[in-house]
Amino acid sequence: MSLTKEELLDLYNLDLDELLNRAAEFHSNKIEFCSIVNARNGKCSQNCKYCAQSSHYRTDIESYPLVELDIIKKAALESKANLATRFAVVTSGKTPDEEDFDKIIAMVKELNTIDGIKSCASIGILNEEQAKMLADAGLKRFHHNINTAESYYPEVCTTHSWQDRLNTCKLVKKYGMELCCGVILGMGESVEQRIEMAMELSEIHPESIPINILMPIAQTPFESYYDKIDEENILRTIAVFKIANPDSVIRFCGGRMRLSPENQEKALKTCVEGILIGNYLTTVGKNPEEDIKTIKKLGQEITV
């Protein structure tokens, strides 16, 4: 039975250890590794205020077009060696153009030939034809975040809407692909809006919920937003997300290094069941060997 906003707020405000213990009731003690390749970087037309890749801001990142197929395959094989079972092709931009999309379809088909790797993609907003073509190519999972609560979305981006993102999520489900859909915490949202995100995700019902924590990037509008959320509230939010979405894998993604090693371990023991290993799109992550060592230390099992 779905919890109300008031019930989730009450949970959010519990003693932290009690809240984490509540979330742990839904935790499997298994951790799934996934990985990504940044297949096209920069020159994005959208004005998402957190993003180094937006052409609206002068962040001095390296921009490059869609990489070649052999780079994708090599990265996927390296990820497999680091115990990742899912691998995603990630591109900047609102939506891929026709030439790039055809190449991405070929990438998906190539990933599907690698034993032990499930193909994923994160390529922006989809139309119906694109969703169908990805499904026909055998794409296992598509990633597309809501990023924040619908009520807060205009504070984050104005070149597309929250509803545009939701429509893509619905298309992914319509064509039988798994959905990876999550958020970025610490962009100035209120506690109530974090609860709103948890409830919105429970209605979308993604198989995987990636948790990103804002890493403020110089020259973006959110460059000074480092203090918008602290470690305790990150843990509280993740725990409530797990309680509201007990059947979804809550996944550590970009920005988890803002949590101390102790708090990362607390989350892994109680409410997080997935890790995006290696580096992220424009920020540095953690060495996969460190993650493997941590999972073994906690007595947990890495899903293979």
Image (cartoon, rainbow, N blue to C red):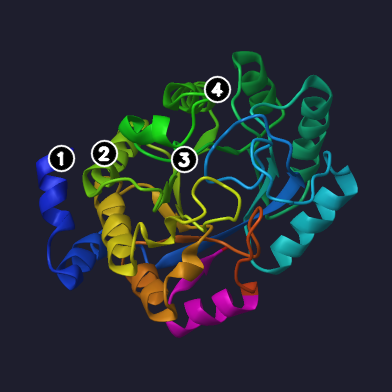
Residue 136: percent from left, percent from top: 68, 24
**Residue denoted by label 1:** 5
Say few, some or many: other residues with alpha carbon within 10 Å of mark 3 (under 14 / 14 to 19 / 20 or more).
many
Magenta-highlighted residues: 289-303
Residue sitting at x 64%, y 19% = 132
Task: Tell me the amino acid under the disc marked 3.
Answer: Cys
Q: Which mark is residue 158?
A: none
Query: Gap between marks 2 and 3, in whole Å?
Result: 15 Å
Task: Tell me the amino acid under the disc marked 2.
Answer: Glu
Say which element carries label 1: helix
In primary-sequence order, the first of circles 4 and 1 is 1
Residue sitting at x 21%, y 44% = 192
Say few, some or many: other residues with alpha carbon within 10 Å of mark 1 (under 14 / 14 to 19 / 20 or more).
some
239 shown above or below 246? below
> Looking at the image, is mark 2 or mark 4 nearer the viewer?
2
Query: Gap between marks 3 and 1, in whole Å?
Result: 20 Å
Say which element carries label 4: loop
Q: Assess whether mark 2 and mark 1 are in contact (beta carbons under 8 angstroms).
A: yes
**Residue denoted by label 4:** 175
